[in-house]
Image (spheres, helix red, strand yellow):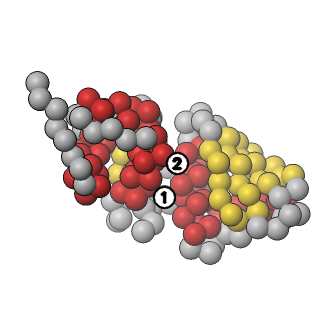
């Protein structure tokens, strides 16, 4: 079987959309491997940027499996942001959020968009499987950021794809 060679980012992203819509991408590592099988070599960082730019989010599908998927602009996900937060704590310039397993990246994406849009006073977030660390702009702003995140998830009840 011949390998497909895609030189442009546009072609690569079109292939990523196809892979995500077919439900085969459960992680960024899965995406890198799936693209490699198609003859497209990318780093995990490139895969991550492409997923973000395309608006793909990782969450449970209808069968309960965590995978990347697209949420239409008008479609509201079955869950609310508040349901993704188990606990919020703060220390120094950090707010730490505990989520259900597999939900951290989904919530972190929403928080990063809120930071980018100026709705939260942070620099960015780092997400694991069930923990998110959000960095405040202020050296002692972790507590205020944690309170702002709590307000944000309470006020923004539905997850809509924000562009």
Q: Which residue lies at the image location 43% right of the left edge and 41% below the top edge?
A: 43
Q: Tell me residue 104's x, y (percent).
A: 59, 43
Q: Where is residue 51 in the image (x, y as percent from the top left)?
A: 40, 50
Q: Quadrant of residue 125?
A: bottom right
The CA span between labels 2 and 1 is 9 Å
| Front position in the image: 131 or 34 | 34
SS of the residue under disc 2: helix
Judged from this view, the residue extending furthest toward the left is 1
- In the image, 94: left or right of 58? right
Q: Residue 102 carries which label?
A: none
Element assignment for label 1: loop
User: Could you say which disc has been placed on residue 159 in the image?
Assistant: 1
Quarter of the image holding residue 118? bottom right
Q: In this orientation, does residue 24 appear?
A: no
Which residue is pictured at 70% across the width and 65% down the height? 122
What is the x, y in percent for residue 71?
A: 37, 55
Q: Residue at label 2?
A: 106
Earlier residue among tags 2 and 1:
2
């Amino acid at each position: 079987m011949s390998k497909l060679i895609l030189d442009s980012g546009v072609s690569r992203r079109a292939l990523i959309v196809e892979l995500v819509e077919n439900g085969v991408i459960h992680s960024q590592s899965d995406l890198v491997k799936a693209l490699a099988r198609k003859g497209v070599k990318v780093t995990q960082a490139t895969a991550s940027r492409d997923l973000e730019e395309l608006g793909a989010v990782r969450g449970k599908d209808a069968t309960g499996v965590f995978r990347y998927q697209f949420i239409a602009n008008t479609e509201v996900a079955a869950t609310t942001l508040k349901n993704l937060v188990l606990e919020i704590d703060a220390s120094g310039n950090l707010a730490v959020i505990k989520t259900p397993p597999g939900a951290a990246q989904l919530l972190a994406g929403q928080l990063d968009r809120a930071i980018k849009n100026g709705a939260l006073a942070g620099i960015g977030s780092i997400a694991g499987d069930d923990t998110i660390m959000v960095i405040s702009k202020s050296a002692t702003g972790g507590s205020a950021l944690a309170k702002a995140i709590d307000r944000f998830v309470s006020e923004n009840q539905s997850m809509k794809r924000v562009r």
